[in-house]
Amino acid sequence: MSASHSILDLIGNTPLLRVNSLSELTGCEILGKAEFLNPGGSVKDRAALGIINDARQSGALKPGGVIVEGTAGNTGIGLTLVGNALGHRTIIVMPNNQSREKINTLRAYGGDVRLIPPVPYKNPDHFVHTSQRLAAELDEQLENGAFWAGQFDNLANRRFHEVTTGPEIWQQTEGRVDGFVSATGTGGTLAGISRYLKASNPDIKIALADPGGSGLYNYYVNGEIKVEGSSISEGIGNSRITANLADTPIDVAYRIDDKDAIPLLFDLIRSEGMILGGSSGINLAAAVRLARELGPGHTIVTILCDSGLRYQERLFNRDFLASKGLTLPAWLAQDSA
Ligand code: PMP
């Protein structure tokens, strides 16, 4: 008999999936790491497990201690499922402009969700600072203490990608990978994977995909963080260089507009049966850009971060899309005509 004894054993070791339509379009192999298949439904299960394992080992998180985090949602879901499996309650501080599906999922897992207004990072009421303060207060009050996960600057995040996602990609491509491209929120995914891939072969091109509303594209191209535009994607983009992202060996940066990413996402639903979230659309549009730059015959890997079903009320909502200058996929536009 072969059975996993914990849901935590199902985190990682995700399949690598060829995106056929984009591979045919570009003459490259465009491969997506199917992170939406993690038990919590996103790439952030990895960061959650990496951070919690590290904190339990170091003693920063005591048995029965409470986990506190500020998150756009997916990390909170990952932390709550990992916490449940290991005997820790979670308190999740989240900006109130994130998708209702993520909030409901967190609540279904039993996370204690605290929604607060979104404000810039320099404001002390930003969700990251609010969660850090709350963790410090609770650590004083609770018998088993509280631990602040601090995913943006806690290097256990990128380390977990460096020892799992990176080697998985290397093995799954048998070392025949020419480029890796990803958008970044905390930086953990891009930084951890790039470090491993560059150490394995320094010629692998590492590309940053940046959505509207983020300042990282300008930082890597012009040396100055400058935020422009906006995006319906969630969980990606930043206006600062986090500790996880610092020193990442980025060769090229692309600014990707929703007008390129969202229609591509809709096409994949009908051409391949894949319903993916906005950040995966940004990643795949950037993979096409990198493929054009490298030319036919190359292998490019990116991340399929989470499912589009996590954003149904926005991604498939005529009025929401129209307010962003986007349109419904043809089959839904017909149904509701
Ligand atoms: N896509 C989605 C949907 C996410 O929630 C996140 C994490 N916030 C990312 C991509 C980016 O991952 P990372 O934090 O590792 O940069």
Image (cartoon, helix red, strand yellow):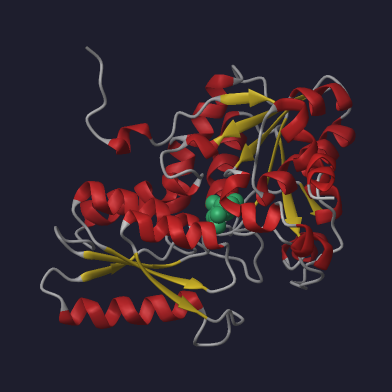
Q: Residue furthest left?
A: 143
Percent of width and height locating residue 243: 52, 63
Question: Is residue 333 found left or right of 205 in the rendered image?
Answer: right
Question: Is residue 105 found left or right of 244 in the rendered image?
Answer: left
Q: Which of the two residues, 168 or 107, is positioned nearer the viewer here? A: 107
Residue depicted at x 58% and y 79%: 118
Q: Residue furthest top?
A: 1
Percent of width and height locating residue 109: 34, 54
Residue depicted at x 81% and y 68%: 323
Q: Dividing the picture into quarters, in which one does residue 204 lie? A: top right
Considering only vertical position in the picture, is 98 above or below 45?
below
Residue depicted at x 53% and y 64%: 72
Q: Dividing the picture into quarters, in which one does residue 176 lie? A: top right
Percent of width and height locating residue 291: 83, 32
Whether residue 319 is visible to the viewer of this picture, yes or no, is yes
Assign the N terminus to one quadrant of the image: top left
Q: Which of the two residues, 77 or 29, is positioned nearer the viewer here? A: 77
Residue depicted at x 75% and y 42%: 265
